[in-house]
Image (cartoon, rainbow, N blue to C red):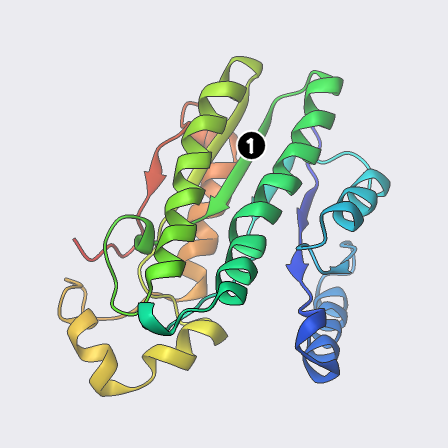
Amino acid sequence: MQYMIRMMLPSAVNSGTAQCCQVNFRATALKDEFVSITPITLDISNWNKTKEVLRDIGAVDLLVNNAGEGLIKALQDVEEEDIDRIFDINVKALINVTQSVTEDLLRRKLLGSIVNLSSQAALVGLLNHTVYCASKGAVDAFTRACALELGPYNIRVNSVNPTVILTEMGRKWWSDPDRAKPMLSKIPLGRFGGVDDIVSTVLFLLSDKASKKNIAPVHPKNQR
């Protein structure tokens, strides 16, 4: 079986030209590093536009739902637009992309694998993360339901629920030593995770080596 992996990164088109240019720059850099891929810059919170783009990219056998946005804000400071933005990217877009890809898989009657990037925030409470925790809890619930529904068609659905990973988004909050210390004290290895820790886990779940793994969340560098 020949696999194609499509990774979609949200373009924050409502956050100003500078951020859009940054996303486009990263897509170009990714293409320069891996010439066989075709990066697509897309605001995946746009339901209809996402559907349109996915119809045009061809067959997809493996899907990594990696797009996401964080929010660190006390509950009393949360505004309606915060909830809409976080759930549009972290939940609604994930459902939309998964629906589109699996419709094609079912039509072609082929097996597939889907990995949803969730978080430890789906499993434990984190200070000032109420909306983010809620969104990742929804990701886990959706993953379980999808695995049950799609398993009979040999489409596996799993989630990865890491602790703090030092991506650009992770560094914005956790680079402060005073803020990081309480969290690090709960991690037996005494360090936050790196991107490679998650990549290796995702690749395993996509591969035939995980052919019997369906629905179970994976917690790399878990704090518990």
Q: Is residue 94 left or right of residue 202?
A: right
Residue located at (48% from left, 54% from top)? 199
In the image, residue 42 above or below residue 202: below
Counting other residues with Cα less than 10 Å from the Cα at mark 1, is it few (<14), some (14-19), or many (20 or more)? many
Q: Is residue 125 left or right of residue 91?
A: left
Residue located at (24% from left, 71% from top)? 191
Q: Which amino acid is tagged 1? A: Ser
Task: Pick whichever, 94 or 23, lies toward us.
Answer: 94
Q: Position of residue 211 (x, y in %)?
A: 46, 25
Element at label 1: strand
Label 1 belongs to which residue?
113
Quarter of the view holding residue 184: bottom left
Q: Position of residue 186 (x, y in %)?
A: 14, 64
Q: Residue furthest top?
A: 152
Residue 68 visible in rendering: no
Task: Pick whichever, 62 or 126, lies toward us.
Answer: 126
In the image, residue 176 above or below residue 72: below
Residue located at (36% from left, 50% from top)? 161
Q: Position of residue 2 (x, y in %)?
A: 71, 32
Residue located at (58% from left, 54% from top)? 88
In the image, residue 133 above or below residue 177: above
- Tell how many labels: 1
Task: Pick whichever, 155 or 30, lies toward us.
Answer: 155
Quarter of the view holding residue 72: bottom left
Quarter of the view holding residue 57: top right
Residue 221 visible in rendering: yes
**Image quarter of the N terminus:** top right
Q: Position of residue 114 (x, y in %)?
A: 55, 36
